[in-house]
Amino acid sequence: MWEKLGLDLDAHDALLEMLGQLYGQTFMSQRNRPKGMEYFDFVMSEVHGLRIKEIVDAKEEGRKVFGSFCVFVPEEIVLAVDGILVGLCAGAEFALDEAENLLPRNTCSLIKGAFGFTLSNVCPYIKAADMVIGENTCDGKKKSYEIFRDLVSDLYVMDMPQMKNEVDRDFLRHEYRRFAARVEEVSGRKIEVDALRKAIGTVNAKRGAMHRLAGLRAADPAPISGLDALLANQVYFYDDPVRFTESSNQLCNEIEERIGKGEGVFDKGAPRILISGCPMAVPNWKLPTIIEGANAVIVGEESCVGERGTRHLTDETGETVEQLIDNIVDRYFKIDCAVFTPNTVRLEHIKEMAKAYKADGVIHYGLQFCAPYQIEAGPVEKALEADNIPTLRIDTDYSMEDVEQIRTRVEAFIERLKG
Ligand code: BJ8
């Protein structure tokens, strides 16, 4: 299967070995994990195995696969033509030299990661995708897609508004309609109203399960680690949506029982931290590992791999495809990504999350050279501190060189929270 997909077998083996070791050290050493996490361990162990096989089999049955890098790509539209939407590999430093041959060094790790995985032929999802979707969000992505176009077979670029005025909503509507037409063309299927409504229901159910999980993390002692909750949020982008929803709800059932018994994975009263900022794609577990290794618990992620990505549901009422697409536009238009200006809604959401999950402090996570989030970090920190929410800004990349330096800063911050 790997050969058929055109993967570099040696490089892919090296990647899997690295991933396996990192996964073992990061997740399997945690104590008292919910049993329901076994499902997510299984999916991760098969993320470059059975899940790809499933996708390849689906392609043989005529289904189309769409790959994406952003939560602005509406999964509902892809599901409405019985397509599969997958998140593409971008969470690790791989083939960095090759990526830096094409991109300036001062490009964020996420973009360099996507290039590295693609150039070294180790991402089976990119290989399996019939169409890769780019989006004109930040300047880094927008300009790099001009180069990325030559690395993949079919790159479709969705344009994006930058503000949240009525004219910008109209623009997003136009882009989603254009996207829907392209999805119809690639799949050879017309989007029917019932299929689109069902797809909206499927994605709402998936997001609803994540809302449930997020709410349960308000308990003290914390019934699930931040690392495990992040893992569920990461698996969200790879798994079959219906199976994912069932497994997440089962995990939530177990967590509810734990809360009823007062059981947790950290001691009651352990410092509670909200992470806010850039998305953490698999296998970017660096900062959460440091935080939880210092005996503080992460109680929420204000991130696209987290609550920013899953927060709102889509209205399922509507009699026509156009009406349902309008509902989708309304839902996605609320995403408070830092590429928008102004973006004050995000600050309000961080405060709401800190309150709802009883966070003692916020760690703002910025990827180096990510202008939108790094620039927004200053005003966010200032406003949170003014509201008596202690805040620490960490700017980093995917390398491991600064781990000790970050650990020292995180430990000092945790001491501040305890004080
Ligand atoms: S909706 S956060 S997933 S754009 S880290 S590539 S912003 S320079 S990932 Fe994002 Fe969509 Fe927004 Fe979410 Fe650019 Fe920053 Fe890099 Fe980033």
Image: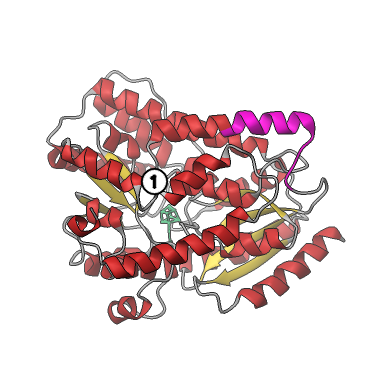
Q: Which residue is mark 1?
A: 238
Above/below status of 273 relative to 112:
above
Instruction: State whether residue 332 appears in this view.
Output: yes
Instruction: State whether residue 335 appears in this view.
Output: no
Q: Main secondary structure of the magenta part?
A: helix
Q: Where on the picture, by quarter, is residue 185?
A: top left
Residue 364 locus on image (x, y percent): 62, 61
Instruction: Judge left or right: residue 196 versus residue 32.
Output: left
Q: Residue at x 21, y 50 (%)?
A: 131
* Mark 1 element type: loop
| Mark 1 closeness class: few <14, some 14–19, many ≥20 residues within 10 Å | many
Instruction: Judge left or right: residue 70 versus residue 344.
Output: left
Determine if the magenta segment contains residue 299.
no
- The three-letter amino acid code for the residue at tag 1 is Tyr
Q: Residue at x 39, y 46 (%)?
A: 238
Determine if the magenta segment contains residue 257.
yes
Instruction: Judge left or right: residue 349 versus residue 399.
Output: right
Residue 227 locus on image (x, y percent): 60, 52
| Magenta stretch, residue numbers | 251-265
Q: Residue at x 32, y 70 (%)?
A: 11
